[in-house]
Amino acid sequence: MHCKSLWIKASAKSPAKDQFQEELVIRPLHSGDIYASFQFRTLWDTDFLQEGQKKVSHYRLFPKSLGQVLSKFSVQELHISFTQGFWRTMQWGQPFIPSPPGAELWVWFHHTVSDVDGNWKELTNVLSGIFCASLNFIDMTNTVQPSASFKPLGLGNATDHRFLRYATLPREIVCTENLTPWKKLLPCGSKAGLAVLMKSEKLFHSSFHSQAVHIRPICQDEQCTSKAWELRQTLNVVFDHYTSGQGKKEWSLFKMFSRTLTEACPLASSSKVYVDITDNPELSPATPLLSQAVVLGDRRTYSVYDLTRAETFGQLRSFNLLLRWKGDNMLRPLLHAERYVAGFGLQTGEIHTVIYNNHPYRAFPVLLMDSVPWYLQLYIHTLTVTSKSRDNKPSYIHYQPAKDRHRPHLLEMLIQLPPHSMTEVTVQFERALLKWTEYTPDPNHGFYVGSSVISALVPSMVAMSTNFTQDQPLFSSFVPVKEESSYFVRVYTEPLLVNLPTPDFSMPYNVICLTCTVVAVGYGSFYNLLTRTFQVDEPSPPLAKRLANFIRRIRGVPLLA
Amino acid sequence: MSKQRQDLLIYFSFYFVFYYYYYYLLCVFILLEKQRVRNAVLAIAAVVIVVGIPLWWKTTETYRAWLPYSEISELDSLQVTHIIMCGLLSRNTNPRTQKKVPLSHVNVKEHQIDAKTGLRYKYETRYRTATIMEEDALNQPTAAEADLSLHMLSENSCGSVVVYVIPESSALMPEDVKAYVGQRRTVLLRSPPFRSSWSLKEVLSNLDVEVEQVVSTMSFGHQDIVAALSNRVRMTKVTKESMADSMRAIKSSPGYEITFSLLNPDPKSHSLHWDIEGAVQSYIQPLLNKLAPIANFSVDSQILYYAVLGVNPRFDNSVSAYTLSADSLSHVINPVEARLGSNAASSNPVLNFLLYVPDAHHSPLYIRDHSKREVPSNAFHSPRWGGIMVYNVNEMYGPEAERPVDININMAKVMGVFLAQLRLMLGVQRTHPPTGFVLQSPGSAGLADWELDRLLWSRSVENIATASTTITSLAQLLDQIGNIVINDNVAQQVSSAVTSLQSAVAELEAGNLAFALHYSREAVLASERAFFDPSLLHLLYFPDDQKFAIYIPLFLPMCVPIVLSLLKTVSEAKQRLADKQAKSD
């Protein structure tokens, strides 16, 4: 008790501790592309969910705008990502932090929140303002509460999925206007440190671009006596230099970003560049510092450049890395998935999700989550899961049917994948007819259905390290590893583009005109019937007779009667 | 005659009879038919006019809920009464007058600001003698202590002022001090010299002059009110200073966000530490606690790195320092503002206070005013936005110090400047006491009670002005544009705003400042909610040409036959009338 009061006194006097780390990982991919992954982590030993006098209001490294959002909406955990392009798992392997194309947002609210839906609505609007994105289009029709797929990544064993909200906007287009506010959240902005490299014309001239913000409470130390809040900003880019660089497998920092590094962010406690040298590429300048890390079930070797040390920058005071490589052996990802729509016509169709387990001898379970908009009416009785042409019964199914214009379908399944197999999940659907105001401005483009999410604990080929040491590089410490023999992977499939029956949009005026004409014609005949008099007319003589009479008149012969 | 022939004859005669009969019937029938057609035409026209048009009108009508237009138009002309209670406690200076006290009188002044806005000041003065306890309190050695102990005795109500008249020879105040204005709502007034022969009336009339001076110091002047009413009233006869005051002060709002930002453009050389939490607790929070009845305040702070000012300071060789001239100050804020960020969690107005520590290569930096002299505080403020202070740190370390240099910022110095700026922003007007008046310093709260009363009053008046202007212009707008749908929600907001406004004016008249402010704030909120209700925009733009385009396919084919046959009927009727006249002639 005494100890605790002392601690409170001490914390009241000195401002809460915060620290900032930055990191860049560069991994040459066997396809010839280059994968660059930035991670920025701000740690703050404080608690945003405090109320009253102890409310957090004095910010140093942590961005004020996000902190205010966290405390106002009582957010326990927040994950938001904006992605342009699709991550090709089969060619590129697993990304450090996966994300689906478009925008994805999932939030765990604190269990004291009473009106979760109201908070969610307001939160999406505020975030859409902060990130200049169309997150305000998230509403009840595309929000789901997954029961198992999205567990909190930070502290707090929240299991009640009433406090979880998940939504994707597969159509969201990510561009500079989203990058600028994202950069603004960094303490050094884009003025110093690794963020200097983020030149938008280079970053968006790439095969894949994904930026994300992850906020979660974590332990301050190993004993986990108190909470700290972690803000991770990640940016992943895949540059396609192989095809544009005449087939040469080489790159340099300057070639990729058209900038070089001159200094670390002065506020960063660590600032490092990691280069994956597992395939023994030529690297210049060379560094004596090597580090090994087991990431996603794969042991890799990295060269480490510490930007906080002056010798990294050499005589020129500028740091430019050059790398040539030949390597083309890549660990085939053990788990990957794809999805497509089958069927013809505009009435029914079938969604196929194919999940591959490439492990030669281990079977493992995966959680498949599908969120389908209400206008594709799923026939859940047609759901079939087959692996190796045999029926594979899911051990857990959570299905929440859609309500028209209110709620999407949510389908979650736990499927056991046999070793070295392909599992196919199919479900049929019928396309609904929308009201004419519900169509998007370009309805003939089609309607997007967000990616399916496959979460799994994949058996690892090498032992994963489970200890929480400080020296772990950021890219390997995002998802906490609970056991040595397996690692957590989340795989996103392609989003679907489905055509819906589309009417002719000049229809309303046509309808008005047509009904008016019908009414007018009906009314006209009715009116005529009422107001005209009808008389029997003398039938006029037939044409032959009239002709005969005409000739007779000319001849002067008496006419025919 | 054969039977056959006879038959034929009969047949023919029958035929003729029938033929003529038929012909006759036909003639009658045609006449009847004409009559029927005419009736049908008239009936259809009548049905269209009596049933069709009202039906169409009713079904295509926009819903417009009832609004209290008459009460709104009453609001258009505003009469505000300002009541000041003046308890005058005379110390027992003259035994003759003692019996006749207490008595009271009311003094009313009227001002018509413009055609629609009027002000009525009502000064109510009550006299009584001091109680024994108050006498004791007044026997304290200094005025400040007397003020405190008088405050302990009784709490004076909001908006009132108690004037204690102390004998001419009292040692409570220095000789040259005529009046001592305390921290609360009391004034110690040295009584003017009396002659013992004076009647009570003379004594009081002599006192009145002094009291009026006190009141005009402690309550605000006419100009300030006009400035507070600036939303409604055209500024014409306002002095420059009170206009500047009113423009500087941020508009009345139910809450404010105060943000302190430390700008560190050079984190490589300076590692700045500021104890903002402690500084806010000890300097800002007392003032905000005091101001709690006026608005909700929330305070936060942030540190922004690599944030630079918008102008490059010029190096002045004569003082070997960088200088910012007064003209360039207006360009300073814009680039910084992009970094400040707005408050994501509320929509209240934000007051920004920036502390700028110039980078090592541009220090020291001084701000110069229009007459090229250095501003002693090295700070400036931007009306309704906030303040900026430049804090030079170059003297705190030598040239060979190891970078980054740890620097602790002297928060007392900084907060002194920011507090003064905050007072200006919040509209605490400067007081100009007449000679001989001493104002006690407001203490840690930074605001005396009577200053708070003044603020309450001007905020109420400002709110009332804002709300009444909003409601009247909304009513005018709704009246002018018939296409706008007025739903029940908007109507309810409007009527609640009107009732709140009426009660605010009534409370103000009764002198209940706290209630007046409460109601006036409710009125502002309700009126804004009504004015910015999104439902007002739905059908705002539905032009007439589009309506025509939609209705013409239906109306044209329906109306043409009706109109034509009506015309025909009318011309036939005319013809018949003419025929009849011709026949009678």
Image (cartoon, coloured by chain):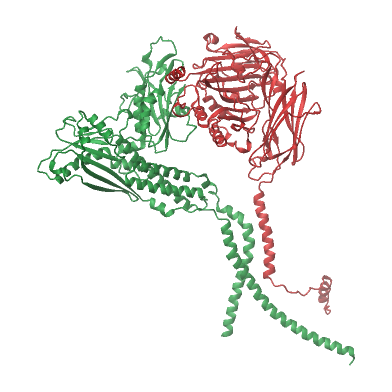
Image quarter where the C terminus of chain B lies is bottom right
Name the residue: 67% across, 56% down: A515
Q: Where residue A294 sits: x, y (%)?
A: 65, 14
Colour of chain A in the rendered structure image = red
Residue farthest to the top?
A288
| A466 or A240, nearer to the observer | A466
Q: Is residue B419 left or right of residue B212?
A: right
Q: Is residue B235 left or right of residue A235?
A: left
Q: Is residue A318 left or right of residue A502?
A: left
Residue farthest to the left?
B197
Where residue A287 sits, quadrant-wise, is top right
Image quarter where the N terminus of chain B lies is bottom right
Q: How many numbered markers are drawn?
A: 0
Residue B306 showing in the rendered view: no
Residue farthest to the bottom?
B1
Q: Is residue B43 left or right of residue B310?
A: right
Where residue B257 sits, quadrant-wise, is top left
B573 to B220, vertically: above or below? below
Q: Where residue A303 sits: x, y (%)?
A: 62, 11
Q: Where residue B291 sits: x, y (%)?
A: 36, 34
Name the residue: 77% across, 18% down: A361
Residue B407 showing in the rendered view: yes
Q: Where residue B501 sits: x, y (%)?
A: 39, 47
| B23 or A92, nearer to the observer | A92
Where residue A239 sits, quadrant-wise, is top right
The green one among the chains is B
| B333 or B63, nearer to the observer | B63
